[in-house]
Image (tube, helix red, strand yellow):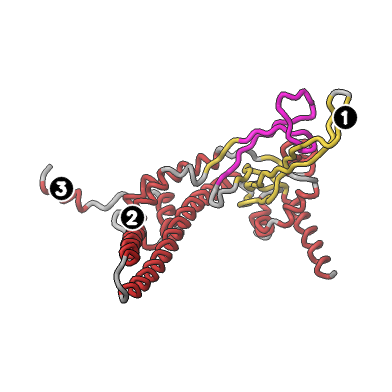
Amino acid sequence: MSLFSTVVDFLKPNAPIDPALGKALDKVGELVDPLLKMAPGFERQLAFPLQHALGYCAGLVASLPGPIEINRQAFANDPLVHALFATADDIDQMLGRSQAVRDFLAEPESWESDHFYALFAARRQHKKQLGIERQGEVIQNDVPQLVLYFADHMLVEPCCQLELSHEKLRAKALESLLRTFHDHVEALRLERQGLRADVSVQRAHLAVLRGTTPGPEYIVGSRHLADLDARLHQSGESLMPAQLLAALAEFLAAPEPALHLSPVSITVDRLGIIREQTSDDLDLHTLNFPELTARDRRHYLAMFARIRRDEAREAVEMVLDQQRRFMLL
């Protein structure tokens, strides 16, 4: 290669960054640490891990089941929806109390369709009870039973277009990863603050001992101070932009522990009592759904829901009326 060609190649502008990658890089600076963008090789070091994370988030959202209808008719006919809510009235309460639904219905875009989509999430719970069971012709009392129920119902990113809802959730999935790493950085900073306090206390303690006759306690204290100093130095190094950048790249290259779906299969009867799959009872239904594990490490059933706009609006008005009545009382 000639010297001229080498110079030309050197002066060529860098290839334009993919818009999705550009937005993701901006999110890193916004949600993790603005100083990261000043680190040498910021874009180069994060380009591949971020592309991998974006692809992972897209696959995660695409694998969510649904959309399932959530309404009173589905409560009567769909075993999964029946298991998700204690009563049909609870569906109205969820819709009416959802701030995401209220905000969505207040926007003009909510009139684009007579229905909308949203990510539906709820936490799986179990409770033990003593109940009645029939075994052949014999009815037994006080039989230990395990009941399935769901709590903390929520709707995320309501949208008239399913693909747009997918797009918003892909962005939220990446944000969840970045916020998880931000939490890790904050934990490192708190650890460093604690080490600084420990070093100050230990130095003060040694200063007192230094005024007395040196002995084993002073030697042990000096060793402890040296250990604290080493840990403090290591903690400070881990918070340097270059170190954080490398750690973030490693985290994004393997995001599964921080954000993943796990398949769940449970067989229940109409009352929500968990049964063995081998039973011949025709009233049993096996529920299959994924559970999402994210930042708070809790498990949430997650799937797309389809909801009628007029039913959601009626539910919101009903809950608002209930709140007004309560305030008057």
Q: Where is residue 212? Give x, y as percent.
A: 32, 75
Tell me the residue that label 2 is attached to: 243
Q: CA distance from mark 2 to mark 3?
A: 32 Å
Task: Determine whether, in the image, residue 114 is placed left or right of residue 157.
Answer: right
Which residue appears at 36% of the width and 73% of the height?
204
Nearest-to-viewer mark from 3 and 1:
1
User: Quick one: which residue is furthest to the bottom in this view?
Assistant: 211
Tell me the residue that label 3 is attached to: 6
Q: Secondary structure at mark 2?
A: helix
Q: Where is residue 17? Give x, y as percent.
A: 36, 50
Nearest-to-viewer mark from 1 and 2:
1
Which residue appears at 88% of the width and 24% of the height?
137
Which of the two discs, 1 and 2, labels the residue nearer the N terminus? 1
Q: Range of the magenta residues? A: 264-293
Quadrant (top left, top right, bottom left, bottom right) of the N terminus: top left
Would you say residue 2 sits in the magenta stretch?
A: no
Quadrant (top left, top right, bottom left, bottom right) of the C terminus: bottom right
